[in-house]
Image (cartoon, rainbow, N blue to C red):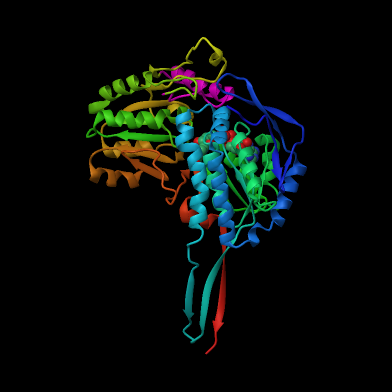
Amino acid sequence: MTVPSTLTSYINGEFVDREHYFDNINPVNGCVVSLISEANHQMIDDAVAAAKNSEWARLSVKERCVLLNKVADVMQAREQEFIDAEIADTGKSLFQVKTIDIPRGTANFRFFADLVQYPANESFITETPQGTKALNYSVNKPLGVVAIISPWNLPLLLATWKIAPAMACGNSVIFKPSEETSSTAFLLAQVMDEVGIPKGAFNLILGRGHAVGDAITSHADIDAITFTGASATGQRIMASAAQTVKPISFELGGKNSAVVFSDVDIDKAVAGVARSTFTNCGQVCLCTEKVYVHRSIFDEFVGKLKQHAAGIKIGYPTDDDVFMGPLVSKAHQTKVLSYYQLARDEGATIEQGGGVPKFGDERDEGCYIEPTVLTGLDDHARINQEEIFGPVCHVSPFDSEAEVIKRVNDTPYGLAASLWTENLSRAHRVAPQIDVGLVWVNTWFLRDLRAPFGGTKLSGVGREGGLHSLAFYTEPSNICINIEE
Ligand code: NAD
């Protein structure tokens, strides 16, 4: 496995090493993978100035799309490097990186390069009662310089989900990846360079949130901010962006429920709920943390879910059949373990897991954690209200449809939910009553890039995906032309 040994920012078409480093740690064994050169405020000013002056917005849509498709071609050609880098940073399983993170990262460029070519502009013929006629039409212009700030859980996938539409629409970008996962961001900068993306169109700023975050989000020449990350960080960014009234798009935290009705095939529902709880060690914003199971099948369901969790293979991310690698970092392992302790303190029954696996080798220095199933708490326990972001769910029984809808909605978050039922009418009746941005029925994490994506309440502001992305990354300017008789 080869990964770059020093990661630097990329500004105005140049890689810039400030020679002020922090360590990038491998969560499998706690060893240093690479050094990350942290940007300073002058570099942010330089990047924003380069973005503002870039010729990118002046290229035709066709020219931009040809270049973005080339970005996808080179990413595909260098796929193994992206796979190795993503695994080294996150410890996530080879299967996931190979089938989801990297191919979907590449697909984002192809999808938005295609999509941006087709939407028509709005136009209207206006006729006033006085007989004046006019043609109104709108021109969708890029916003200018867009700051993109992304998290560590699906690093390349979530970053390109925003970089691709922003650039396809003609914006220049200032991209700040998570300090935990800068390697694929650095490779992407190399790809942009190799493809010949005009200077200043894509700028990469590496650094920790506290060191570079505010300088980006409060910058007067940043025209919009799109952010994926924790709700508390979103609140800070919103306050910072308020100084210059920038448009924002926020994809934030979640506390997602799965509801299992009595009519299901239990084995299928257990497999689905387990996948939605334990995928990527629970480090997907859409993962299930609360499970509501109809009382008539509760004991059988919990028994089978425990069994499933106990059978999950944990190990080296690149070993065959490994479903769970480590969590992303020691800090995150400490946080999730503190919730396992809190569950005990709040009086939960630990049905399965609740600790750290022991390997007897270098992995004991890593950030591994056991998949965990809890029962016995009420809905207002902190375990059932706060986002944990680990491989853990709490399972509760319910008796009626109306009751479970109320309980699912009783959270400050509103990102996603999944319903498990064979009753079609029930699915249609219940799904729209759940106060979230996405409801899955008998599936989970099945995404269509054209569909709106985002959350309600503390889970976000706005929607991206398909035409929603194009709407966010452009500003319509209406032109009204008098038609003289
Ligand atoms: P985080 O908020 O700690 O960090 C996200 C990014 O923000 C990082 O790049 C970080 O460096 C940066 N940042 C931190 N402080 C900043 C500041 N003051 N100004 C500007 N930038 C700052 O989140 P995380 O721990 O990396 O990611 C996990 C969180 O992300 C979870 O809450 C998860 O639910 C959420 N998430 C949401 C979605 C979604 O689509 N809704 C997707 C993935 C992750």
Which residue is outermost to the top? 360
Q: Nearer the viewer, residue 426 or 155?
A: 155
Residue occupying the point 24% across, 44% down = 424
Residue occupying the point 52% across, 36% down = 154
Direction from residue 61 to residue 419 in the image, left or right = left
| Any part of residue 305 in sight | yes
Q: Nearer the viewer, residue 411 or 120?
A: 120
List x then y, in percent, for residue 373. Answer: 38, 22
Q: Which residues are magenta?
A: 321-347
Residue occupying the point 59% across, 37% down = 184
Using the image, determine if residue 103 lies above or below residue 309: below
Q: Nearer the viewer, residue 270 or 335?
A: 270
- Split into quadrants, the picture shows ligand 1 in the one at top right
* 325 magenta-colored: yes
Direction from residue 366 to residue 438 in the image, left or right = left
Using the image, determine if residue 54 lies above or below residue 253: below
Prevailing secondary structure of the magenta residues? helix
Q: Choose top left, top right, bottom left or bottom right for residue 168.
A: bottom right
Using the image, determine if residue 290 lies above or below residue 422: above
Which residue is outermost to the front? 77
For the N terminus, the image quarter is top right
List x then y, in percent, for residue 233. Answer: 59, 38
Direction from residue 237 to residue 361 in the image, left or right = left
Q: How many marks?
A: 0
| Any part of residue 252 in sight | no
